[in-house]
Image: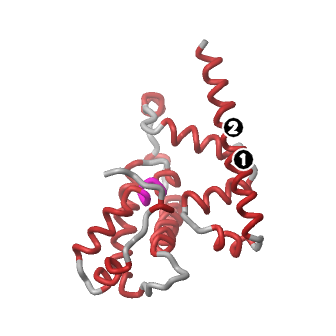
Amino acid sequence: MSTLHPAKIDTPHELIVRARKGDSKAFGKIYELWVNSLYRFTYLKTKDEDVAEDLTAEVFLKAWKGLKNFIPRQDVKFSTWLFSIARNSVIDYYRVTKQTLSLDDMPEMPELVESIDLHPEQTRLQDALKHLKPEYRTILELRYIQDIPISKIAQKLKKKEGNIRTLTNRALQKLKEVVESDSGQARMTKM
């Protein structure tokens, strides 16, 4: 199954209607459409594959239970609802783990050294995002990770849509520069 960008995924209205009536096959198709994007979102927030898998499963469980309360409307995308569940699940995860995390649960130092980065491109992108100013980082996260349309971002940030488009383009350009400069430094170090 290929992974599409969340903005390119469209959840058919009839699937939502059937799933709201308890049709598990329709919900299974919704799951297939969204599982990769939601996993990627939770992984980017937690940087832990196991936690991301657990949170993704939790998101779908909450969505299944809460689907009867979701009312399809033209101005609210199904993806926005799903990603808000994912965002809240990540927040809940951090709220709980920060309260219960003990030093006994921390890995030993040799385990940290032996760990292998299974997602080097994501790690590079996350590092590059840290070098952007907060406004750019926020806009890119809202647009490309949370899949929020430009009009909604404009409302949320109290800016005009044209400004959001401009800021998005500038943020992407700056991100590209940071990634390319990091790649150049990495090549120089290898020489």
**Height in image: 156 above or below 118?**
below
Quadrant showing the C terminus: top right
- Taking the spot 43% from the left edge, 63% from the top edge, the residue there is 9
**Height in image: 24 above or below 97?**
below
Instruction: Pinpoint residue 93: horizontal percent, then vertical percent.
Output: 48, 63
- Taking the spot 67% from the left edge, 59% from the top edge, the residue there is 139
- Taking the spot 35% from the left edge, 69% from the top edge, the residue there is 60
Per the rendered image, the range of residues in magenta is 37-41
- Badges 1 and 2: C-beta atoms under 8 Å apart? yes
Task: Classify 10 Å Cα crowding around label 1: few (below 14), some (14-19), many (20 and above).
Answer: some
Q: Is residue 97 left or right of residue 129?
A: left
Please, what secondary structure does the residue beneath circle 1 have?
Answer: loop
Instruction: Pinpoint residue 158: horizontal percent, then vertical percent.
Output: 76, 74
Residue 39 magenta: yes
Decide which of tag 1 and tag 2 comes sooner along the chain: 1
Identify which residue, 32 or 10, lies in the foreground.
Answer: 10
- Taking the spot 22% from the left edge, 73% from the top edge, the residue there is 25
As drawn, the label of residue 108 is none
Q: Quadrant of residue 164?
A: bottom right
As drawn, the label of residue 178 is 2
Please name the amino acid that badge 1 sits on: Leu
Please name the amino acid that badge 2 sits on: Val
- The span from disc 1 to disc 2 (Cα, nearest Å) is 8 Å
Judging by the rendered image, the residue that carries numbered circle 1 is: 132
Q: Is residue 51 left or right of residue 80?
A: left
Task: Classify 10 Å Cα crowding around label 2: few (below 14), some (14-19), many (20 and above).
Answer: many
